[in-house]
Amino acid sequence: MLTDRLRRPLRDLRVSVIETCNYRCPYCMPAERTPEWTESDHASSADRLSFGEIEALVRSFVRLGVSKVRLTGGEPLLRRGLPDLIARLAAIEGIEDLALTSNGSLLARQARALADAGLHRLTVSLDTLDPQRFADLSGGRGRLDDVLAGIAAAEQAGFAAIKINCVVQRGVNDGDVLPLLEHFRGTAHVVRFIEYMDVGTCNRWQRAQVVPSAQLRDTIHQRWPLRALQPNYRGEVAARYAYADGAGEVGFVSSVSEPFCGDCQRARLAADGRLYTCLFASTGTPLRPFINEGDAALAQRIAHLWGRRGDRYSELRGDAPEAGKRIEMFMVGG
């Protein structure tokens, strides 16, 4: 079995299909600190991997043990013809879980096509149910109703258990936690609260903005008692809790307060074909030049890169210097 220097296997691949987005969320792509080329879907499209190149790369990762593939962005639903790519990936033997993360704004129009193409699961980012705060958190570009309509359309298309990701920031949307849970309690959907992370450098992250998951759990438990659940699999990033009254689950992703580097089995492929072995990496390795070598040779190169991996940024966050270049979230997904 392929493992890295810390004996972590390669099981999970995130593939960014596009680096542009129609939102300007302050924690990911703040409008005032984002390169101008991200405004246009065409500006950097020549550098993106084709669907054929993505398929070839994914096949090589599957050869090495990857069984979970998630499509991200940017906003992946901006990528033209995305259902075609999903159908190609869904046909790859060995992929047990094919998922997609979206801001949900375009989901109402595309949910049925995604399901028909073979997508297994959906995750939708939703940080508040307050319409004005939602608009503010999307950089003035989003409408809450569009996202809720997208979730409803996804339900109609057969996506029964949608994950709802909420990045919690102190003094911004920490008061929206209970209303968000109230809205989705009793459905099959799972709200997951994510600690605000220092991914990239354009969001001007400060630790004081982080609301620890333990604090959120205490707040929620006072309203609706919770009980801890066992992970579904090794390397699952969200700590799972069930409502004691049987009304569903809630998850917590605690990269800052409770780092999970020791079990990280995830690689990230940027839209331009660069491989990043950590969400907080400063550099990536181009894989596109090696695609024509064939699946076996490409897999061998990927295996070499994974074998050298020793990333554990979150565990060392307190020891690391404050400054330093890191890949931006919109380049590799969350």
Image (cartoon, rainbow, N blue to C red):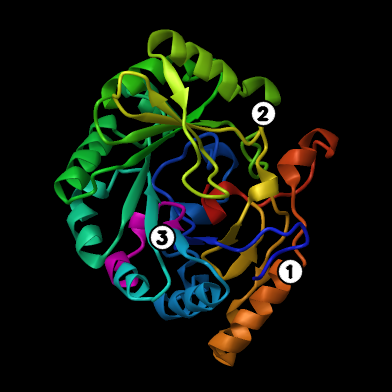
Residue 259 is at least partly visible in this image: yes
Q: How many numbered tags mark residues here?
A: 3
Specify start and end residues of the magenta stretch as a single range.
Answer: 71-85
Q: Residue at x 32, y 23 (%)?
A: 129
Per the model, the C-alpha gap separating discs 3 and 1 is 35 Å
Decide which of 187, 321 is in the foreground and name it. Answer: 187
93 in relation to 140, above or below: below
Q: Position of residue 315 (x, y in %)?
A: 75, 40
Quick check: marks 2 and 1 in contact, CB under 8 Å? no
Q: How far from the left and from the top, in percent, is residue 89?
A: 37, 72
Which mark sits nearer the N-terminus, 2 or 1?
Answer: 2
Cα distance between the residues tagged 3 and 2: 36 Å
Quadrant position of residue 148: top left
Marks 3 and 1, the one that precedes in the sequence: 3
Amino acid type at mark 3 = Asp
Give the residue number, with chain letter if any, for mark 3: 41
Please, what secondary structure does the residue beneath circle 2 have?
loop
**Image spot of residue 290 (x, y percent):** 62, 84
Q: Which residue is rendered at x = 24% and y = 40% of the image?
A: 151
